[in-house]
Amino acid sequence: MAQDTIDDIASARTRARPSATPLASGVVHPAASEAPAAQELIGPQRFEFTGTGAEYFRIWVVNLLLTVLTLGIYSAWAKVRRLQYFYRNTRVAGSIFDYHGQPKAILKGRILALALLVAYKISYDVSVVAAVVVALLLAAITPWLLARAFHFKLANSSYRGLRFHFRGTVGAAYRMLILFPITLGFIGLFVWSLATSFSERAGGGVIVLVVVLPVLALAGTVPLAHYLLKRFQHDNADYGQTPFFFEARAADFFKVYGKAVCFFFLGAIPATIFGVLTARAYQFLLDTPFGWLFALLYGVLSAYAFYLFVRPYMESRIQNLVWNSTELSDHRFESTVSARKLLWIHASNLMLITVTCGLYKPFAAVRLVKYRVESMSLVPSGNLEEFLADQTMERADAIGQEAGDLFDIDIAL
């Protein structure tokens, strides 16, 4: 199936690109007149983020209070306010982005997600077999949910007043994205069957099979699934009449994941040395009346330290790989996110959020987004102003009506 999918991708790559020459539609978007029309945008255009932590703090506090008071119902309206703030403070080439999602559509998506979780919980209480069946059904509809989420996100996003569009079909979503759910399903059934068959006399070989084979299967599946997801997401996106193209290879994702695994094991070496050196102090604290609390905090912080060490590397390398491999017609993007800078931002954000009992969270969010956004540039192949002015509104109106028929599944991809 993976080979078929890759073959489909290869054939998709042969589709003709539109010429870099501006389309001769002759229709100029009204918002284009708000841009610096007299300016010739021919050099790299760096993305900017103009939001501040103090501004977003006020939005965050109101969103949090109203979400609590309405028992979560307001969270859909909170998401719209949050995304509108971040979109409207992101600009490139002198123009801003905007978000047009409707809270009721987002609320419908969240009700659906809640219903699916409740169905899984009820089935788990009934029997393990019922839980497995429901889990397989959830895995089976995952490509459909992702396709709907991508449609909703792009149809409700705009730049210079012109909306983006996602043209990926449900059939294409199943061809591209069913690999990972199927692999997870087989791994779950494999582990469950071995665990139940040898629960009383499990030997070392069985334990190795239960642990090693799923890890090997995930190591061969997760990078490929991530690559297919990003290709499906970027290769089916349009801005106006112009399609995006995704040029990365699956091997590039395997390299990033392989190095991340190496970083994980390298981080385990100093962690082990620290554990050996502090073993006596650790045992002393465990023998105190609050030893259970110390053990809990020590375990959580140790796990998060590993996550904090690997996360900046993955975030920086994946963002750079994805956007350095994405083109809008013949215009390309550049991303130069640094793993070291991200590590400093994540670590200091965590410390400040802990010290302020969570009140620094909106400032931390703005700080992280500002760095990641301003690490990107749009590199036009010619006069960008002429290209942007030539996009038409005809399709955007239809897309706006289409967006009203969709609902959002809150997937941060």
Image (tube, rainbow, N blue to C red):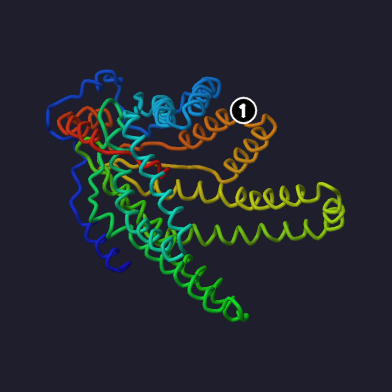
In the picture as drawn, the residue positioned furthest to the front comes out as 126
Residue at 81%, 46% (x, y): give it. Answer: 290
Crowding at label 1, few (<14), some or many (≥20) Cα neighbours within 10 Å? some
In the picture as drawn, the residue positioned furthest to the left comes out as 25
Q: Does residue 394 lie above or below 202 as drawn?
A: above
User: Which residue is at the front of the view, 192 or 354?
Assistant: 192
Left or right relative to 112: residue 164: left
Q: Does residue 211 lie above or below 171 as drawn?
A: below
* Residue 283 image position (x, y, % from top left): 84, 56
* Position of the C terminus by quadrant: top left
User: Which residue is at the front of the view, 176 or 382?
Assistant: 176
* Position of the N terminus by quadrant: bottom left
User: Which residue is at the front of the view, 361 or 90?
Assistant: 361
Helix, strand or loop at mark 1: loop
Q: Does residue 232 lie above or below 373 as drawn?
A: below
* Residue 119 image position (x, y, % from top left): 40, 51
* Residue 82 image position (x, y, % from top left): 44, 28
Which quadrant of the view contains residue 14?
bottom left
Left or right relative to 265: residue 237: left
* Residue 137 image position (x, y, % from top left): 35, 59
Left or right relative to 334: residue 172: left
Residue at 55%, 31% (x, y): give it. Answer: 367
User: Which residue is at the front of the view, 49 or 202?
Assistant: 202
Left or right relative to 160: residue 302: right
Residue carrying label 1: 359
Q: Amino acid at mark 1?
A: Leu
Residue at 87%, 57% (x, y): give it. Answer: 280
Q: Does residue 320 lie above or below 133 as drawn?
A: above
Which quadrant of the view contains residue 380?
top left
